[in-house]
Image (cartoon, helix red, strand yellow):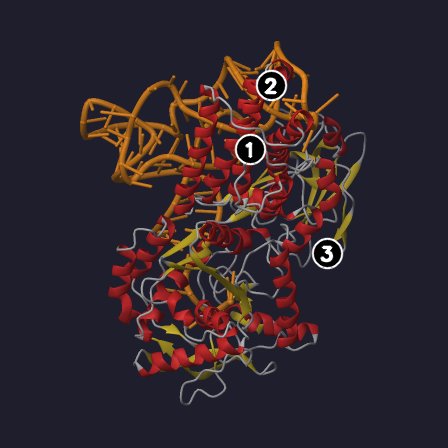
Amino acid sequence: MARWLVASAWPYINYVPHLGTIIGSVLSGDVMARYLRSKGEQVLYVSGSDEHGTPIEVEAIKRGITPRQLTDENHEKVKKLFEAWKISFDNYTRTESPVHVEFVRDFYLKVYRNGYIFTQEEELPYCPNCRRFLPDRFVQGQCPKCGYPEAFGDQCPSCGSPLDPKDLINPRCTICGTTPEIRSTKHWYFDLPRFAEKLKKYVEENPRLPSNARNFSLKLLREGLKPRSLTRDVSWGIPAPFPGAEGKTIYVWMEAVLGYISATIEYWRLKGEEEKWREYWFNGARSIFFIGKDNIPFHVIILPALLMASEEGYELPWTVSSTEFLMFEGKKFSKSQRIGVWIDEALEMFPVDYWRYTLLSIRPEVRDTNFTWELFLEKVNADLNDTLGNFIHRTLTFLCRFFDCKVPPEGELTEADRQMLREVERAKEAYDRLLGEIRIQQAVQTVTELARKANKYFNDRQPWRLAASNREEAATILHVASRVVEALASLLEAFTPTVALEIWRMLKLKPGENLKAGHQVALPKPLFRKVSLKEVEEKAGGGVKVLEEKVTPEDLARLGLKVAKIVEVEEVPGARKLYRIKLDLGGGLIKQTVAGLKTYYRADELLGKLVVVVSNMKPVKLMGLDSEVMILAAEDDGRVAILTPERPVKPGSRIL
RNA sequence: AGCGGGGUGGGGUAGCCAGGUUAACCCGCGGGGCUCAUAACCCCGAGAGCCGUGGUUCAAAUCCACGCCCCGCUACCA
């Protein structure tokens, strides 16, 4: 029998993960681990907290604690959260684990002795005040290409040009603001290009890789691999084991990917079976990695190359399930802008299986998908509550009301009954086939679809009509319906484990046990409840989530949209983009605005123009000048056009 | 800029790799049925011809080319 290692990407724990992080990694991995276990396979599911590196060090400094204190705290928190999310890890460990540290050092020493590591001097920005070398992201300054003042050392967010920190004008350290200097430092490199041929073969000959992972990796290989730097001048990390590398640590990415192995070792060491981990990494063991698409190079290129470089004969990743991204209400999840839902707040709002079901049913397998509250309501109310929950509840209630909560015997099956039982088998087959291809989204749908068919069956057969007149036939129908409930429990286990357990409990069965005629079930209680938009609004309030509201004519009226005529345009001393503009709003009313139009319009172009304004803006001061209204303009990729009435109307005309 | 992934009824998705019955499913919408069940459930109907153009083919949403649009990546941000 094959041994399976299920692995999910290690969350970087400078903060709690959000919904997008876990659907691609730990939640998907959990489904697969549960599924394979249910098939009787030998499965080990591992992951852990990724806790080294500059961002965590900086976060700790900000909070006045040590990095270790920070990660101790966050690791405990995240670990507990994953338990609450019912993620069935066999080992959720961390990169500070002594087993990991020891393994990484041994591993790289081996790779070093095998001759795949070399050193090189390079020049990097160094902050004399923080006394540290700065990663590119930690240097900010003016972009040499477009002049944007807040460009990062690796890229300008305004014009998109890739940059080198040395090119920035007036560079500064983002931690303390000091001007960095360029210092020379020596670093150790992993000779990745040496594995290009073998990697190409690996990718090309692995038919299981999803197309995004495959194509992206082949593209990287076509473009040519570069040596990967292995070390950093950062104190918070695993000390590099190479001779002469005192004071250097291993770059976080390059050690965290080895965590999959160290977590396996740690698991078996704790069990007292020191050598057993090898069964999960050698001799035909199969590994499945669950990651987001941003992680493809590390799992399809770098990890396999490192395994090759060890020359120990490790099995390479059997497949990598790389999802696209989950968006939140049409936007990227953003910690700084508070866009999204984090896994701690999610559970404070609704039961874990509401989330698991919704996320799994929109798992971004083909393209980016979008989480919206509207969608959440649809999944919970229509799928879970109305379809699944109601079918189970109506069946068990019927059973208790008419048959003393006892499962009746099968009796004589009609074609419709046989058809229903065939649908159960068909659903199980589809479920197996789809999960075998790691198509979780479709597999979830298969289960809901079965419940739908069961509702139809129940309706068509109308057992309530027969309960008095033809008790035997009614009995047969309820026998069949009960078996569907039983099947739903096992099919739901991987997706919504808490609900599955609850169904087993109501059936008074142990998970996986078969239902027999005469078996007594419990009085049912509803598995789900409906969620209202209002409830979401109340719970999700606090500015964390944004609900898309439809606008009424009254809302439009609130803006006080009016036509106004520009009667005066003046430059604002000292401002690069601003004009001070006076507008005639009709009836002798003159209001002033300060608008950023100077780069788009000359003063004489604006003078006399009829424009659309929001007349009841809350006044603000810009460059010390009052701005009371706002001129509406359209923006298209850097070009700006003022809105103006299509034929002349009186200033002050209302806009409807 | 280059590269990768996409553009399918009003909304959300599947189908595309392995071309082929009336383009599937959920929500929503209009009408009807049932009353066992959590105002649930079931049925019927309206609504797209699959971004555009051109090609390959007996046959294309599915393959190819070009164009337009969206998202992401470009690897010392984790």
Asked which quadrant contains residue A365, the reply is top left
The amino acid on which the numbered mark 2 sits, given as a three-letter code, is Arg
Q: Chain of mark 3?
A: A
Q: Is residue A177 above or below residue A220?
A: below
Q: Nearer the viewer, residue A129 or A471?
A: A471
- Please tell me how crowded label 3 is: few (under 14), some (14-19), or many (20+) other residues with Cα within 10 Å: few
Counting residues from the start of the chain, the first of labels 3 and 1 encountered is: 1
Which structural element holds mark 2? helix
Asked which quadrant contains residue A5, the reply is bottom left
Residue shown at 30% from the left, 71% from the top: A313
Q: Which quadrant holds the N terminus of chain A?
A: bottom left
| Residue A636 appears anywhere in the view | no
- Find disc 1 in the rendering and name its residue: A517
| Residue A576 appears anywhere in the view | yes
CA distance separating discs 2 and 1: 15 Å
Residue A623's disc is: 3
Residue A640's disc is: none
Q: Nearer the viewer, residue A627 or A297?
A: A297
Q: Is residue A366 above or below residue A252?
A: above
Residue shown at 42% from the left, 33% from the top: A426
Q: Are marks 2 and 1 on the same chain?
A: yes
Asked which quadrant contains residue A384, the reply is top right
